[in-house]
Every structure is written in structure tokens, then in C-alpha cells.
Image (cartoon, rainbow, N blue to C red):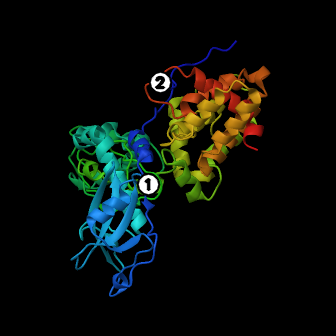
Amino acid sequence: MSRPLTMAVEPSSPVQKVWKPELYKIQLEAPTPKPLHRSRPLPTNNIKNEDHCYGPEYHGLIGHLDAEQLLSSKTDGTYLLRRSPNAEDYYTLSVRFNNRTKHFKIYYKPGKGHYLLEQSKHYETIHDLVADGLVNFYMQLHAAPIIQQINQQTRNCFQQSPYMTLNRRKLRALSHELGKSIVGAKAQSEVVTVNTISNELVNEVNNINTSSLSNTSINTVKDVTDNADAILPLVYEKAHTFKVHNFKGLNWCEFCANFLWGFTAQGMKCEACGFMAHFKCAELVPAKCVPDMKRIRGVFGTDLTTVVQLYQSSVPFVVRRCVEEVEARGMLQEGIYRVSGFADEIDALKLALDREGEKTDMSEAAYGNVNVIAGTLKLYLRLLPVPLITFQAYPCFMQAARSTNAAEQLINMTEAAKCLPPAHYNCLKFMAEHLKRVASHYAANKMNEHNLATVFAPTLIATPQHMTNLTEEIFMLSTLIANCENIFH
């Protein structure tokens, strides 16, 4: 009889979860924009000489007391636009938040959009402006301790950042190639100016082109032993070219691991290497820009919806390729998904998938141990910033699993699945069907639905980080696997 696993993460995992979900969950709770449409046509004297670009949420010439009366009984996020008495070159946005009405001068310029201050963010629509404002209000009210922690960070945090955790092997590979170029140049000069990254990231062989680093300066000194293998770079400096960026989809700061909140201009992005960070975090990122990283950032640690949109597929290629390989040669492997592959081999396959994409050789000749393939799939799912069973859908699945009537349980599980975004729904369906096929070979592989759920629950489910007892989650997931044909019909 199998014993349930109650630990929140696998002890043998080569990389634990690196992203912090708190800010993302707080943003999900923020009020959303709700325009208050006027109930009657504007008076004729309101229309005269008006030159605005607003719709039915514009209420014409009214004062702030009238606006507050209109909004007083409305829910947070409700807003209207108006012209204040004596206003010359601006309109007024009145919005309800935290049971109070706030008023803001608002401007519009063709080609620039809507804005509150000339030097502040500009928005294509009023809806976007209000949505972004509500999120920021809500963050200030409910996320102050987390934001304070972000602001109190130091440069010392970089070595434990998601950027280093996810890309250390890639950086070592790039460094080694550059180190070889140093050796060649050293034969002609005792002091050489070449490209590389910091001394800590040296000594890994990998065939990666580094031509785009040719404009980075680095000083090395002659090794007293004259041993070419010992000549390593001592200093690396290349400033990042950070620019304010409008991130699409869901993105996390690669310095502090927290969510980049808001709907526009959420943070900074390096144009050369793609490093993403909060405005404050960008100030702390060391001047170690590696431009070649931009082309091998890959899909691990990237939001699922973003990946499927980028590759125009219903399921990420990493998931599909790993599942195909496991089903081809791992279905009869005892302890498949429970037995871990070697961490360095999993990391090597991760690097290959990020660098080569779908063309990656995952054959038995390249990776003879199928547990490496299985471990890479678990790693990919574990590194998703938003888990496969999302924060919003998690309570629905758990409530459905608690139903005592089997038929009612399946109906509720089906409804819970509909709470998932399309990318998560399709991937969860794909994974559940695969795991059921694995479980059908239980006599050989000793992995039934419960055992598989025990392994995958910490990876697939948005459980709180402090939670260690996953008994209910394992039961829910095993039920989902066993009944996947009925739930995902």
C-alpha cells in the first residue's frame, strides 16, 4: 500500500519554486473599473463648446458634491467623468475606492492618450487608466509590507534572485566560451580586453555562440603560473540598458521574485539581455548584462498563457515533448515520476529546451534515463509563476472534492475546471489524461492515481507555501485524474 506524501515540495527537486505569488493574488482581489453611465441626455448648455473624447460615462458640467452623491452608494471601482465648474483645460475623473470618492484632474492628447500628469503614465483608454489606478491604490492599502521589503533590498540579493537560480548554467556556459577566447588572446598580450561574466560563473562547457558580446570590456591580468587553464577573468562590467516597459500578460521581477503589478509601465526591462525588474529593483541589479541571454531565456519560469500564445499551441511544447517521451519508453518504468533523475542531467535538458526549443534531441540516445525526462516535466510545471491549478480555481476544486455524492462531485469538478484560463485548462486536461494512462500500467510501474497525485500535488496546485499536509489536495487530484474523461468532456 502506498504512503501519502505530505511535504509541500520534493526533497530531490533541483530547483524549488522561485516565484512569490502574494502580490499577484492581491492584484486579483483589487476592484475593477465600472463606468457609471449617465441616465439622461446632457443638457444643451452642457454640449455647447464641448470637445471631449468620452462616452456615456461623461456626465457633463457638475461639481464634486453632485459627483459624490451619484457615487456614494456605488461599489469600489465605479467611476464617472465630468467637467468641473471653472475648469479650463482639463476634465475630472471621480472614482470610488475604499468607500470614498476620489477626484483627479484628467487630460487627453491625440497620440499620447489619457493621463493625470504630463510626466506620468499615459493610457489608450479611460478604462485602462482607472484599472491601473485601482490596482495601485489597492496595493498601497494591502501590500505595503511586501512593497517595503522590496524597497529595503540590497545588491546582495542578486545571487539568490530568480535570474541567477534559473540561468546559472546558461551563464556558466557563456562564460566558458568567453574564457576560451581569453586564452587565445593571452598569447599575444599580457593585458587583454575581451568579453566575459563574473569569475563565479566560470568552468562549464557548452556550445553557445557569444558573438553579440563583442563590445563588452573586461580586464584580465597575467597569471603568474603561465598556466592557460588558470587564466580567468577577474572583473566584468557591462551596464544594463533598462527602459520603462509595458509588459504583456503576467510577469515577475527577476531580482526579487515578486509580481510586476499593474496594467501598464509595470517595471523596467533591459533592451540588451531582457532582464525584467521593478523600478526599485532595477537600481540594484549589478552591471553584468549578458546580451546573449536574450536569445536563450526560453520557456522555463514563464507564464503558461504567455508561452502558448507565443508558440501558437494549446499545450506548451515542453509538456508535449516530455509526455511523448515518457509514454514511448517510461510507462513500465517502476516509480516513474516518483524516482528522480540526476539533477545535473535535468538542468542540462532544461538548458537545451530553452536554447533549442522543439528541436531538442530528447531521444534515448541523448537521455537514456527516462526519469530525467519525467523530472524535467515536473521542473517545468513547478517553475510556472501561476500554478497549473490557479489561485482562483484552487478553492473551487477543493470545494468540489469535498462533495460526498460521487455524481455531484464530478459535476462540481467540471464546473471548477471552467474557472481555469484556457491555457491552464488545456494543459491540465492533457496532463490528467496522460497520468491516467500512466496509472493504467500500475501492475508494472507501481504508480496508481493516488501515487501520481501524491507526487504532482505540490507541483500542480496553488497551495500556500506554509502548508505541509496535502491530504485533501492529493485526494482531489487523484479524483481528477481518475475521472478526467468526464470532467474534461
Q: Secondary structure at mark 2?
A: loop
Split into 4 quadrants, where in the image is the C terminus?
top right
Q: Earlier in the sequence, mark 2 or mark 1?
A: 1
How many marks the image carries: the answer is 2
How far from the left and from the top, in percent, is residue 272? 35, 60
Amino acid type shown at disc 1:
Thr
Residue 467 is marked as 2
Snapshot quadrant of residue 59: bottom left
Q: Residue furthest top?
A: 1
- In the rendered view, does 207 fall on the left or right side of 432? left
Residue 145 is marked as none
Q: Which residue is mark 1?
A: 32
How far from the left and from the top, in percent, is residue 386? 50, 42
Q: Residues within 10 Å of mark 2 (few under 14, many from 20)?
A: few
- In the rendered view, does 355 fall on the left or right side of 363? left
How far from the left and from the top, in percent, is residue 467? 47, 24
Looking at the picture, tell me which residue is in the foreground, 120 or 32. 32
Amino acid type shown at disc 2:
Met
Q: Secondary structure at mark 1?
A: loop
Q: Give the answer, above or below, for where 390 lies relative to 307.
A: above
- In the rendered view, does 124 fall on the left or right side of 442? left
Q: Give the answer, above or below, for where 116 lies relative to 158.
A: below
- Taking the spot 39% from the left edge, 72% from the top edge, the residue there is 58
- Taking the spot 52% from the left edge, 49% from the top edge, the residue there is 299
Can you see residue 63?
Answer: yes
Give the Cα distance between marks 2 and 1.
Answer: 30 Å
Looking at the picture, tell me which residue is in the foreground, 371 or 79. 79
Split into 4 quadrants, where in the image is the N terminus?
top right
How far from the left and from the top, in percent, is residue 159? 31, 38
- State if disc 1 and disc 2 touch (CB < 8 Å): no
